[in-house]
Every structure is written in structure tokens, then in C-alpha cells.
Image: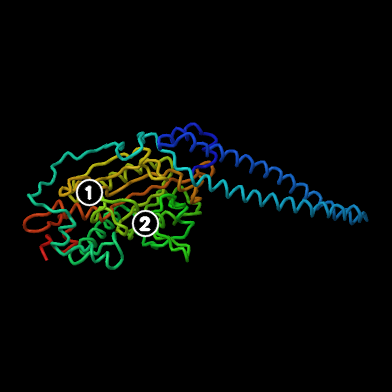
Amino acid sequence: MLSINRIRNSKEKVIEGLKKRGWNDDQLLILNKIVELDDYRKKVQTQNDQLLSERNRLSKEIGQLYKDGKRDEADAAKKNVEALKEDISANEKSMSDFKQSLLELLYKVPNVPHTKVPKGLSDEDNVVIKGWTGEMPQLAEGAKAHWDLAKEYGILDFELGVKITGAGFPVFRNQGARLQRALINFFIDQALEQGYEEIVPPLLVNEASGIGTGSLPDKEGQMYAIEKDALYLIPTAEVPVTNILRDEMVRPEDFPFRYVAYTQCFRREAGSYGSDVKGLNRVHQFDKVEIVQVQHPDKSHDTLDEMVKYVEGLLQKLELPYRILRLCGGDLTFASALTYDFEVFSAAQKKWLEVSSVSNFEAFQANRLNLRFKDELGQRRMAHTLNGSALALARIIAALLENNQTAEGIVIPEVLRDYTGFDIIKTK
């Protein structure tokens, strides 16, 4: 959430940034509404402060009037105090309503993109900042996509997932299940070696947690809601993990806070059809290892670069062809100020698959979370939050299966073999 002071004091820069996201003049009018509503709230607050002061003055006088035997004047003053109390109560109700209306408007405004973010409205405008320069996997004629390999090797069952739940809920079996577990353990161990604290968070969050990270209000209808209990299935571990520090005043000497969590993730992913969503390319339930950092604002972009390098190292160890993109304004998530996407190449499908997003949200989430610290001058400031997929397993598995298929079977990358307990997946 943008702070009102930022909208007031840097309005032109905020407008410039929102235009980079594709906002038009009509949408930008919300900024004026926010300032106007806050001005009115301040006006009512000033009036109420005056009423409170007058009430306190009269309350002190009443006792003295009674002591001096001026009962009529004291009784009249008491009536004035009662009237003031009613006015104060009405003003407080108004201010509460204004505050809620103000929040509802602020919740509609996305983060302002960093200056590094390129202009553009879709993924076609994203900028490749590091392309793959190595050799692409050379597959034999007749190489299969992962959904066909899944049947041949008995490692993944899409039809069974449909039977149990519905489309987009695959069932991993046999060596496929072991490969999934191996990747999870590998990613977690790599993060622990880098000093991240492992977290096992709930898979359900309340509304406050969803609001804290910008997942709620759910603008794209991507979250699964359990309405009876007012809970939501998490779209990523970022939501519960970042909320660990909600409403906290942290100590600057404790920066950075570094967390890693494996969770299952749930997304509706509505409105997509065709080969882009076939098999593991897009599913409603998937496993992911997430890294989250909370950092001092002066160091957050250096930390973002560090996290990007870390994810790149994971893909290098898995021996997967990859490229790194800087997302344009129109492709940023609602809360992100700057995002780098990682894509791996699927040799059988002959296309790039997104497997990670690494983002700096700057103070946007911290404003919602009320996540603060005091600087060396004793002034309260908002922390910066960052996260990254390290990594999302579904498309990683798709690329591993497709790129490593041979006449003998599917070869397991060397770095995973101690985790899987086997070197190759052979036909069932």
C-alpha cells in the first residue's frame, strides 16, 4: 500500500510510475480522491480536537462551580459537556468511516514501479537481461512432452487427479513422487546453507494476512476462499511467511530476516486454455519452495540482486537452460516494485517456461503489515520486503523430464541423485 504522504509529496513520480503500469487519466483520478478524503479527515480531526479541549476545560470548571455553590452554572456546564460528548462521538464515527473509505481506495492502488522497470503492457514487453548462451538440449526424433512421458513411465497421473479432485490437480506416483520430494529437500538444503531460517507455515490464512501482502482484496479471483471460516488457501508461502512480522517494530540490527518455506500452493488460474496450460504448465495445486527477506530500505535492492544470483545458481546446478527477464510495468504483480522472472527452456515443447519470480516490494507490503523499525535518528520507517520462488516445482519437473529423456530413460541431474536414490527413471 502506498502511504498518503508519498502520494502527497511525490504525486508526479507516483503518476509517472502508474502510467508505466498502463494506468490512464481516469484511473489516476483516484489519487485526487485519496488526498481529498484525507484532507476532510484531517479537518474533522482538528474540529474534534477542539471539542475535546473544550470538554476537558468545562469538566474541570464544573467541580469548582459546585464548590463555589454555583449549582445552576455547574448544571448548565454539565449539559454542555453532554452535548460535546455527542458531537465528539459523531465525529469519531465519521473519522472511522473516512479511515475505512481511505483504506479501500488505497487498496486499489498498485505499487509504483522502480525506475529500472521498462515501460510496456504485456509479457511481450519484458526485457531479457541474461539470455542462455550454452547449448540447448538435443533430443532424438520423436521426443515426447512431459504429459506423454508421465504415462510411459508411470510417474505422473493427470487423469487420476481429475477423478479425485478435478483438472489441474495432478497425482505424482512412484519415482515421480520421489523426484518431487528430492527437489523440495534439495531446495530447502541449499537455502539453509545460505543462512535462511526454515519455516513450516499454515496453508490457510486469515483476511488480515491476505491484505498484508496484497493478495487481498483478490483483484483477479485467484485465491480459493473458505467462506464459512473466513480463511483462504495460500497462493504462495510468501503470504504466511511475510506475515510473521506483521505489526512488529523490529530492530535494525536484526536485518535481514531471511526465511525459507516449502508449501503447497493453490491458485484458480482461471480463463486459460490450450498448450500453455497442458500438463504441468499450469495447475491449480503445486509445490514451491519460497525465500522471503525483510531488509533495511537502504539495502533492499542489493538484496534483490543477491536473491536473483541465488536462484540462478539453483538452475545452474540442475543443468537447465535458463534466461532472466526484467518485467515491464504492465506485467508486474500488484504489489511489486521490481521483478525478475526466470524461465527454463523446454526442449520437447520448444518454449520457455516461467519457474521463478524474484521481487522487491519495497515498503508497499510493510505499509499494509505495519512492519516498522526505528532508524539511527529514532524515526519510524517502514522495512522493505522481498521474496522469490526457489523454486516452483511443477515446471521444473516438466523441463527436467523433457530435457533429460534418452533411449534408456530419463536421466536425473547429478546434484539430485543423493536425494532421489536413483540415477535414471526407466519405463514402468
* Kind of residue sitting beneath label 2: Ala
In depth, the one of 1 and 34 nearer the eye is 34
Label 2 residue SS: loop
Q: Is residue 364 left or right of residue 353?
A: right
Circle 2 packing at 10 Å, graded few (<14), some (14-19), many (20+), is many
Q: Percent position (x, y) of residue 171?
A: 24, 64
Say the numbered circle drawn on residue 62: none
Q: Percent position (x, y) of residue 181?
A: 24, 62
In depth, the one of 205 and 22 nearer the eye is 22
User: Which residue is depicted at the point 15% across and 47% down?
Assistant: 347
User: Which residue is depicted at the point 41% across and 45% down?
Assistant: 334
Q: Quadrant of the C terminus?
A: bottom left
Q: Which residue is mark 1?
A: 315
Circle 1 packing at 10 Å, graded few (<14), some (14-19), many (20+), is many
Label 1 residue SS: helix
Q: Which residue is mark 2?
A: 237
Q: Percent position (x, y) of residue 208?
A: 49, 56
Q: Is residue 297 left or right of residue 195?
A: right
Cα–Cα span, label 2 and label 1: 20 Å
Dot 2 or dot 1: first in sequence order is: 2
Q: How is colour applied across the structure in the image?
A: rainbow
User: Which residue is depicted at the point 69% across and 49% down?
Assistant: 91
Q: Are marks 2 and 1 in contact (CB under 8 Å)?
A: no
- State which quadrant residue 16 falls in: top left
Q: Percent position (x, y) of residue 116?
A: 36, 34
- State which quadrant residue 222 falls in: bottom left
* Kind of residue sitting beneath label 1: Leu
Residue lying at the far right in this picture: please name it. Answer: 69
Q: Is residue 17 above or below residue 427?
A: above
In depth, the one of 199 and 109 nearer the eye is 109
Q: Is residue 295 left or right of residue 134?
A: right
